[in-house]
Image (tube, rainbow, N blue to C red):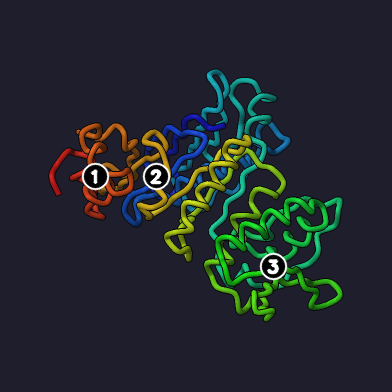
Amino acid sequence: MIHAFRARNYGCLVDVEASLTPLHAFIGPNDSGKSTLLRGMETVVECTGLESRIIEIEMGPWPRGAELLAEVSAHSLSILKKGRSEIIGDHALVRAELQQARLVRFDPDALRKPSGLIPETEPVDFLDDRGHGLAGIYFAIRNRDDDAFASIVADVRRLFPTIKSLRVKAVTTSEVVLEAELVNRERVEAKGLSEGLLYYLAFAALRHLDPVSLLLVEEPENGLHPARIAQVVGVLRAISESGTQVVMATHSPLVVNELKPDEVSIVTRTAAEGTRVKRIKDTPDFEERSKIYALGELWIAYANGEDEAPLLEGREP
């Protein structure tokens, strides 16, 4: 698990540090650096997982050179610096803790696409970070674990009362597509399914993919009815409790309501200071304010969408 992360000269991150928990969320204004933080973590994990102790990599258009530092234990650090990746500390321990990262930012068009079958010997995963390959994943879940597929169907029937069952339908000799059977016996292919159902199915599938050490999620609230957000965060918490660290970027107070104070960090960016990260529990008057507001409502009540000064400096909105 990454306990602390530091980035210098990486995209918009001039010099920023963040402390993390097994399940963690970054909140704050648009263009503050939340997504760049996720990409930085993905970069350092992917580079750590490579065989070479020191490797040359393509860092992208950051002329001053990027430096990423991830603390994974009291004595082991993984560092990516100026286009080179290296391990400081116990190399085996770092690689064991940072095996692989998965970044998802689901898109309904990608989730609807037909996809190929996943052979028994191949890992179960999406084909891209938008969620292409969902149909193939459900084919693999159904074939490899009947109980898991039945459990997902039961949850879908409970949360989406018009759905009777889920199917994985062959559309060619090598491609499958998701299909739902409604309670009136009508069958609806993925192209006609609601975005909310598709998003829920994508998050439900995450628990059945090949495990990674770090799961990064962009805006898990997208496309979901407010009543479904708690279930999705519950899925992400269960994943974090199984040994995969989950870090997300969100704009939803309903997502934040499902988290604990130490699991939420505010990200802001100014021209003078660049990006800064601060846990919400460390903001002024947090104890008193949290007696009045749920966590997400506290953020919204004292946020201004620019520098979050009312929240970070103890001002009244």
Question: Residue 169: image x %, image y %?
Answer: 77, 73
Residue nearest the viewer, comparing 38 with 236: 236
Q: Where does label 1 land, which residue?
A: 272
Taking the spot 66% from the left edge, 38% from the top edge, the residue there is: 55
- Separation of marks 3 and 1 at Cα, in angstroms: 55 Å
Q: In the picture, residue 155 is in which quadrant?
A: bottom right
Vertical position of residue 50 compared to residue 233: above or below: above
The amino acid beneath tag 1 is Ala
Question: Of the numbered discs in the image, which one, if any, rests on residue 13?
Answer: 2
Residue nearest the viewer, comparing 239 with 155: 155
Taking the spot 33% from the left edge, 50% from the top edge, the residue there is: 28
Under circle 3, the secondary element is strand
Q: Earlier in the sequence, mark 1 or mark 2?
A: 2
Vertical position of residue 118 compared to residue 177: above or below: above
The amino acid beneath tag 3 is Ser
Q: Earlier in the sequence, mark 3 or mark 1?
A: 3
Taking the spot 42% from the left edge, 50% from the top edge, the residue there is: 255
Question: Residue 171: image x %, image y %?
Answer: 79, 78
Is residue 275 visible in the rendered image? The answer is no
Question: Residue 286: image x %, image y %?
Answer: 24, 34
Q: Is residue 107 left or right of residue 275?
A: right
Question: Of the numbered discs in the image, which one, if any, rests on residue 165?
Answer: 3
Under circle 1, the secondary element is loop
The amino acid beneath tag 2 is Leu
Q: Earlier in the sequence, mark 2 or mark 3?
A: 2
Residue nearest the viewer, comparing 234 with 251: 234
Q: In the picture, residue 164 is in which quadrant?
A: bottom right
- Front: mark 2 or 3: 3
